[in-house]
Image (spheres, rainbow, N blue to C red):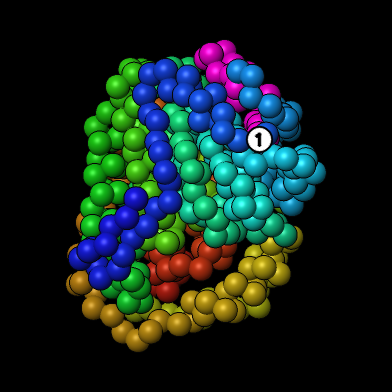
Amino acid sequence: MQIKACSCGREHNCTVEQIYNGDGTLSVLPRLVQSYKKALVVADENTYNAFTAAGGSLADVEHNSLIFPATPLLVPDEKAIGTIEQNLSIGIDVIIGIGGGTVNDLCKQIAYSHKLYYIYVASAPSMDGYASDGAALILDGMKVTLKARPPHIIICDTELLCNAPTELIRAGVGDILGKFSCLNDWLLSKEIKGEYFCKEIYDRVYNCAVQVSENAARIMNREKDAVKLLADALINVGIEMSYAGTSRPASGSEHHMAHFFEIHALEHGQCHRPHGIDVGCAAYFTALLREKVSNASKAPSFDFCSEAYFETVERLLPRAYTGIKELQSRVGLHGNSDGDYDKERINAVLKQSPTAAETEAMLAAAGLYPQSLIEFYGKETVVDALKYGKELKDRFTVLWLYEYLGWEILKL
């Protein structure tokens, strides 16, 4: 898929070759792999059982299977990568990933680094990375996105997706509803930092978010056409990330908060919720920040990078701390205002995103409640995510603008 003449002046490419989204699409899998010598199937116990229960099989295709335990939760880290690589026996020329975001990211990275054909079978409509060209991994305690290659083929069978656990369907909705937040961050960075911006990509992702928000209740009722619509949105957002060459159109302040919850939980031996659920709920808090920032009268101050500040970051994220320091030293967002900015123009950008009340109503239609973040992680951790989540990534968002304008603006 290619867009040569875009209004942004760039050519856009996505190397996904075929997408099957609808009823009975699992039936095409045996035919698709017939021409390959040997397949490696990667899944976990839950996703593989769901796949077979929906009638999925490889028929008589020669293959090895690597089925991770259902518990503990599979982490896309060095250990998981090593386990998959140990199962790449001689003759394997295609990887078949069956699962959600973690399985897909691991398989994307392995297939890319070993130059193998990759077919992805979605077990739930839970995340937007199906077609993206990045693999979200946790390496040295840091949440990083490595350049990879999207699956050559994506299979989304509506029956399989409709029977996914409720929390995973809810996660897919939350991930898409979070796009209102990240798109506003992209506009904000364009205005303040002069970052590359593509209006056509922005509009297509925004439209995906609108469609899902309008059908959230039907999606949660597992109506087939609505679940297919959710899968379409998740696939299309991934394609837009590939077009942009970055996750910027799909990930902003709400994702950075969700990454903080995940990394903090892993660092301290605690549990975390499905990524998309945290993303959706975090979007309420970032919407609240936009309202507070747009009403702030305090002049920007840039004295927040004190020694005590970074001592707190190290205490909260000890394993990731070295990577954080290296990242932020390279990016240079701390203490760098790039001069004064036009408050009226910035406020006009901030107000293009749904309000906190509107966000809360959209989330409620999918059974997502912002207060659940505080109930699950605790108020202190949510405050920490608002303050320190930005350290995990290299992009400007409302979290940075909020910090520039003074932490005391928002009290939870």
Q: Mark 1 sits on what residue?
A: 37
Query: What residue is drawn where x is 39% and y is 69%?
Result: 401
Taking the magenta stretch, the answer to whether it contains residue 40 is yes
Q: Position of residue 122 (x, y in %)?
A: 50, 31
Q: Which residues are magenta?
A: 39-58
Q: Amino acid at mark 1?
A: Lys
Q: Is residue 156 above or below residue 9?
A: above
Q: Is residue 187 above or below residue 336?
A: above
Q: Quadrant of residue 269?
A: top right
Q: Position of residue 298 (x, y in %)?
A: 34, 75
Query: What residue is drawn where x is 48% and y is 54%?
Result: 133
Question: Between residues 89 and 51, which one lies in front from this camera angle?
Answer: 89
Q: Quadrant of residue 271?
A: top right
Q: Is residue 34 left or right of residue 287?
A: right
Q: Is residue 202 left or right of residue 166?
A: left
What count of labels does the image hold? 1
